Image: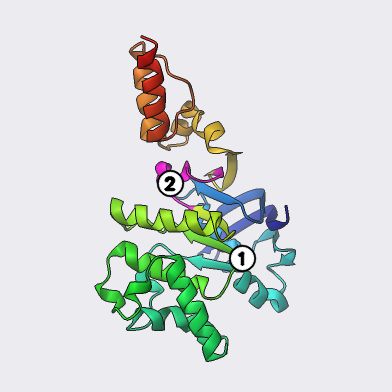
Amino acid sequence: MTEMFRLENVWHRYSEGETVERVALKDVTLSIKQGEFVAVIGHNGSGKSTLAKHLNALLLPTEGCVLVKGWDTRDAKHLWDIRQTAGMVFQNPDNQIVATAVEEDVAFGPENLGIPAAEIRRRVDEALKIVGMTEYRRAAPHLLSGGQKQRIAIAGVLAMQPEAMILDEPTAMLDPSGRREVMETVLRLNRQEGITIVYITHFMEEAVQAGRVVVMDGGQKVLDGVPREVFTQVAELRRLGLDVPQVTELAQHLARRGIKLQPGILTVEEMEAELCRYVSQM
């Protein structure tokens, strides 16, 4: 698979006053392949959002290098290529919505690229269809729900036709219904459109749906693997101040009560199947 992102021995320091520096990333090396869905988790201050902002050159490394499709983010002549390749979606959709009608908002990015009107219309139609918001094309964004607003923000990035999307806690301000809407949209972008996804979250139930999970702590990458590998390390995750999926915790609770289920249960569907298997053997 083609490499989309590569971080090589990346350090990032924020200046806080004339002499004080805060280290946000410490010697991070990470490779993300084209078409992957990678969730990045960690407690507040672990460096996950700083990491995300390096992937489309919103931040530049203090030491080391970040490559996006082989382009070095420190090379100013490739900044536009990098930003077109890797689109960014932030936590608060209101910060990305700029127009008074949904279709105008989605068209904003391509218009600023000087793309012909007919192509803009095609891109807007396609982006709204992908996120399931075609029927709201003439609606006022401020009247939409939080989940709908975030889907419009995603459509606005999609209209720029990126190969990768970095989503920095896009569901943090949403209710469970809105979180579900956004997660279903992101999964569809990855599985049906082939877009590389880097998904920053603190919801473990979202992270288990990724193909790979990276755990950050103190600015360092401390775990990296498929969800079942990462979330079975319950003691280590708790030491890092992180939760585990609720069904994983339930499985542990049942085990303490003598109900021995298969290890590594991550989803409600897996729990249901395993409980049915257990009951059938009683």
Q: Residue at x 40, y 62 (%)?
A: 91
Name the secondary structure under disc 1: loop
Against 131, residue 39 (above or below) is: above
Amino acid at the residue labelled 2: Glu
Residue 169 image position (x, y, % from top left): 43, 56
Name the secondary structure under disc 2: helix
- Mark 1 = which residue? 163
Q: Which mark is residue 206?
A: 2
Which corner quadrant of the image does residue 78 belong to?
bottom right
Residue 39 image position (x, y, % from top left): 52, 48
Can residue 51 be seen here? The reply is: no
Residue 196 is a magenta residue:
no
Amino acid at the residue labelled 1: Glu
| Bounds of the magenta segment | 200-214
Q: Is residue 139 left or right of residue 58?
A: left
Q: Is residue 173 left or right of residue 18?
A: left
Q: How many marks?
A: 2
Q: Residue at x 40, y 36 (%)?
A: 243
Q: Mark 1 packing: few (<14 Cα in 10 Å), some, or many (20+)?
A: some
Pick whichever, 29 or 34, lies toward us: 34
Q: Residue at x 36, y 34 (%)?
A: 246
Q: Is residue 247 left or right of residue 197?
A: left
- Image quadrant for the C terminus? top left
Can residue 91 be seen here? The reply is: yes
Pick whichever, 183 or 43, lies toward us: 183
Q: Is residue 236 left or right of residue 76?
A: left
